[in-house]
Image (cartoon, coloured by chain):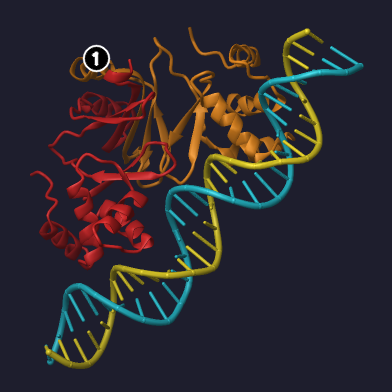
Chain colours: A red, B orange, C cyan, D yellow
Amino acid sequence: MATDFTVEALKQKLQNSQYKLTYQRKVVLEVFVNNPGEHLSAEDVHDKLKAMDADIGLATVYRALELLCSKDIGILQKIEFGDGCSRYELNVTKENTHQHHHMICTNCHKVIEFSEDMLDDLENDIFKKCQFKVTDHQVKFYGLCKDCQ
Amino acid sequence: MATDFTVEALKQKLQNSQYKLTYQRKVVLEVFVNNPGEHLSAEDVHDKLKAMDADIGLATVYRALELLCSKDIGILQKIEFGDGCSRYELNVTKENTHQHHHMICTNCHKVIEFSEDMLDDLENDIFKKCQFKVTDHQVKFYGLCKDCQ
DNA sequence: AAATAAATGAAAAAAACTATCAAAAAGACC
DNA sequence: GGTCTTTTTGATAGTTTTTTTCATTTATTT
């Protein structure tokens, strides 16, 4: 069951939790669908919307991002790269699907994705040793990309 | 070769890069040595210093934290837990040493450490597939701690 | 001890985000 | 369709964290 990023799916999820499907929420999702693989800040989303003649308020962008990241909706995922602002991307995590990791080049600051997970052993180990039930994880690798070595 | 958090080691590293050993940098390091396992924000460090009668400027705390985290010094490590501020801890990462991971309870927001690494296979795989040379990593697990399940 | 280069403190400024509240829009009901 | 109720939005002000500025102080070199 791959995650579905259509407006229909959004509408469904919103209605399941008593939220309304608004133009603003729709176009925020659109920005992510139209810019796959990018890690956008609230400001980035706001700018891209302006460029596509959908000039919605910045506060609304923040509110939409928060909602789309919430446990209820879960269409987006928030990531911290330590560059002073939160960034967001489509949430491709699902029970049976593997998660991807981020590799950050410490020289050119490019962010590359790595789509294998391989953390199942570690998560099982954590549960055995600490009784901590892992539901999600975020992994960042720092190092030198192909071009910067 | 375990990392050494003495003032002598700090002095050495600073001098290697033309930095000066100041009282302020010394006491910032001291706070971390005296509070092992804690993830302190700049504000936290500033407060703890005030409490030990070393009331240095907050801007200086920020500057010391940045320097101690830099590649040149590398005595501290910056972590983002997504709670609105950057946090810092002693950097225990070293070539042959295993890194620890953070587990964050999504219910009570407690942060627990897990001291096994187990990412060598994944890092080797990354190098084979992407020619990305990993030098460091940061792993965060989200889930429910023992008390919150 | 004097010179010089770097670091500090205090305050202002910047940046990212959040709260407020009146006006507008969405969905429900007839 | 139109009306009602509740949610959402936009604009702005406010908060919080972090950075910059610049005159003064401190560390190291000579």
Which of the 4 image quarters holds residue D8? bottom left
Number of labels in the image equals: 1
Instruction: State the image coordinates of residue B81 (x, y, percent, origin top left).
Output: 41, 39
Q: Is residue A28 above or below residue D10?
A: above
Residue A102 horizontal side relative to residue A106, left or right: left
Instruction: State the image coordinates of residue B4 (x, y, percent, origin top left).
Output: 55, 13
Instruction: State the image coordinates of residue A22 (x, y, percent, origin top left).
Output: 22, 67
Q: Is residue B103 or residue A58 the one in the foreground?
A: A58
| Residue at 61% from the left image edge and 16% from the top image edge | B14
Q: Amino acid at mark 1?
A: Asn
Q: Is residue B100 or residue A54 the one in the foreground?
A: A54
Residue B45 horizontal side relative to residue D3, left or right: right
Query: Can you see residue B118?
Result: no
Q: Is residue A81 above or below residue D14?
A: above
| Residue at 54% from the left image edge and 26% from the top image edge | B36
Instruction: State the image coordinates of residue A122 (x, y, percent, origin top left).
Output: 26, 25
Query: Can you see residue B64?
Result: yes
Which residue is identified by label 1? B124
Q: Is residue A33 or residue C17 the one in the foreground?
A: A33
Q: Chain of mark 1?
A: B
